[in-house]
Image (tube, rainbow, N blue to C red):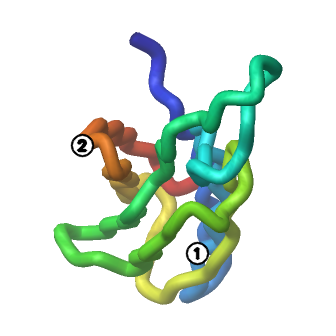
Amino acid sequence: MPSTIRVRATASGDQTDVQSLIQHPMDSGYVKDSKGELIPPHYIETVTFEHDGKAVFTAFWGPAVSKDPYLKFKFSGGRKGDELKVSWTDNLGKTDSSVAKIG
């Protein structure tokens, strides 16, 4: 199965700019389908970005986050060629992770 995570990380001086797009339905449990039935909740609960074995960004989400969420943040200490690991877990216990090289 292809990864649901796309990441771009760019180092400039001591700062690393990170942009990420995660493909996920992020269903709140409050929306109805075309038949009028509620779509069961299915959303990401945690997203973690790790550099050099340490978390540099963690998000705790709920059903209010929109479909295919986009994240952008900066952290200090990354260098070109370093690896940045991204992982998420949703409310159904599904997970995905990806490793990107900092450019």
Q: CA distance from mark 2 to mark 1?
A: 30 Å
- Residue nearer the viewer, 10 or 54: 54
Residue identifier under label 2: 93
Dot 1: what SS? strand
Question: In the picture shown, does residue 37 fall above or below 74?
Answer: above
Residue 42: x percent and y percent?
A: 48, 43
Residue at image x 43%, y 78%?
Answer: 57
Residue at image x 55%, y 88%?
Answer: 14
- Residue nearer the viewer, 70 or 49: 70
Q: Viewed as shown, does residue 94 lie left or right of 44?
A: left
* Residue at the farthest front position: 36
Point out the image quarter for the N terminus.
top left
User: In which quarter of the view is residue 55 placed?
Assistant: bottom left
Query: At label 2, which amino acid type do we have?
Result: Gly
Query: At label 1, which amino acid type do we have?
Result: Thr
* Residue at the farthest top position: 1
Residue 18: x percent and y percent?
A: 62, 65
Dot 2: what SS? loop
Q: Which mark is residue 43?
A: none
Q: Which mark is residue 16?
A: 1
Residue 10: x percent and y percent?
A: 64, 62
Q: Viewed as shown, does residue 22 lie left or right of 19?
A: left
Q: Residues within 10 Å of mark 2 (few under 14, many from 20)?
A: few
Q: Residues within 10 Å of mark 1 (few under 14, many from 20)?
A: many
Front: mark 2 or 1: 2
Picture mark count: 2
Comes first in the chain, label 2 or label 1: 1
